[in-house]
Image: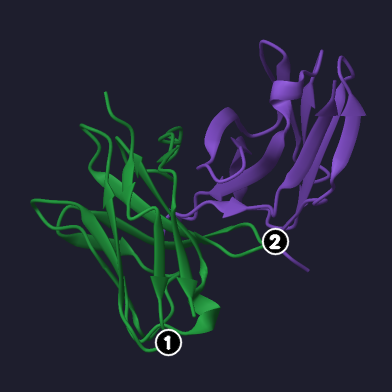
Chain colours: A purple, B green
């Protein structure tokens, strides 16, 4: 079982729809959870990050973490064609031994149809 | 304020040649990370460096790959005797502080990547 599982898509929805993207993970040590957006041929950019369980909202984006079932979600409200990109979840744990690298999901390719 | 600068953006090498990828972190950032993204795969951590020090190289292949971040100049990821399987996008990211410490995530800022093609 991979440490982080993410459906690669593509996920195609009409403009204005609510989008739900999610990842599951197996490593209980993960404590920091992030969502990155990556446009084609570009580098990833950080959208949201949360620590431990709970919700965090920023504009049209809401990140949700449920550590009890090892499941994280990114919601996008009022989706726009400019939201079309690949969304990568990423996780980090603190093991005390220098866990300095993020573990990424493979990314979900999202297409917002005008 | 310039972002993370990577060059070259595209590099073509024949099998057996050497590839050198360079990364200049954002101004004021002293922590550099290298990631590799294979086609249809997620980003894979390779190495974490501070100035003149390799902090974590647990993601680096044991042979042919090396990285440095000298006191002056950019960080360099070096791949010797490249093989076709090395073809990938290599991303550099920088951070102003160390990641992975309690209550400190240290946001990573990524460059646009260097795309290596091995013929």
The reply to whether residue A71 is visible in this rendering is no
How many residues crowd around disc 1 within 10 Å: few (fewer than 14), some, or many (20 or more)?
some
**How many dots with numbers?**
2
Looking at the image, which residue sits at the far left?
B72
- What secondary structure is found at the residue carrying circle 2? loop
Q: Position of residue A96 (x, y in %)?
A: 43, 54
Quadrant for residue B64, please give it.
Answer: bottom left
Q: Secondary structure at mark 1?
A: loop
Q: Quadrant of residue B76?
A: bottom left
Quarter of the rendering containing residue A98: bottom left
Q: Is residue B43 left or right of residue B69?
A: right
**Circles 1 and 2 on the same chain:** yes
Packing grade of label 2 (10 A; few <14, some 14-19, many >=20) is: few
Residue B100 vs residue B79, the one in the foreground: B79
Residue nearest the observer in this picture, A30 or B27? B27
Q: CA distance from mark 1 to mark 2?
A: 22 Å
Q: Nearer the viewer, mark 1 or mark 2?
A: 1
Chain of the residue where label 1 is placed in the rendered structure: B
Residue B87: percent from left, percent from top: 51, 72
Q: Nearer the viewer, residue A107 or A14?
A: A14
Judge left or right: residue B114 versus residue A87: left
* Residue B18 vertical placement versus B97 (above, below): below
Q: Is residue A72 above or below residue A9?
A: above
Which residue corresponds to mark 2? B40
**Eyeballing the image, is B84 above or below A83?**
below
Q: Which residue is mark 1?
A: B15
Identify the residue shown where x is 23% and y is 56%. B75
Q: Earlier in the sequence, mark 1 or mark 2?
A: 1
The N terminus of chain B appears in which quarter of the rendering? Answer: top left
Query: Which residue corresponds to the image point at 20% horizontal and 32% vertical from the top-left?
Result: B28
Decide if residue A83 is on the left or right side of residue A78. left
């Amino acid at each position: 079982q991979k440490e982080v599982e993410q459906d690669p898509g593509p996920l195609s929805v009409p403009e204005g729809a609510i989008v739900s993207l999610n990842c599951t993970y197996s490593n209980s040590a993960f404590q920091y959870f992030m969502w990155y957006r990556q446009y084609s041929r570009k580098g990833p950019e950080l959208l949201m990050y949360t620590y431990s369980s709970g919700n965090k909202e920023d504009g049209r984006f809401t990140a949700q973490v449920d550590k009890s079932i090892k499941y994280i979600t990114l919601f996008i409200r009022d989706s726009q064609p400019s939201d079309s990109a690949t969304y990568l979840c990423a996780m980090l744990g603190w093991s005390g031994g220098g866990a300095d690298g993020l573990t990424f999901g493979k990314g979900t390719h999202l297409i917002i149809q005008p | 304020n310039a972002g993370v600068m990577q060059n070259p953006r595209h590099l073509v090498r024949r099998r057996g040649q050497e590839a050198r990828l360079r990364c200049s972190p954002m101004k004021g950032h002293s922590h550099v990370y290298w990631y590799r993204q294979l086609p249809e795969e997620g980003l894979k951590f390779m190495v974490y460096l501070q100035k003149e020090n390799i902090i974590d190289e647990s993601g680096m292949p044991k042979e042919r790959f090396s990285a440095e971040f000298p006191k002056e100049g950019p960080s360099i990821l070096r791949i010797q005797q490249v093989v076709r399987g090395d073809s990938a996008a290599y991303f550099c990211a920088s951070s102003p502080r160390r990641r992975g410490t309690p209550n400190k995530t240290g946001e990573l800022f990524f460059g646009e990547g260097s795309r290596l093609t091995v013929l």
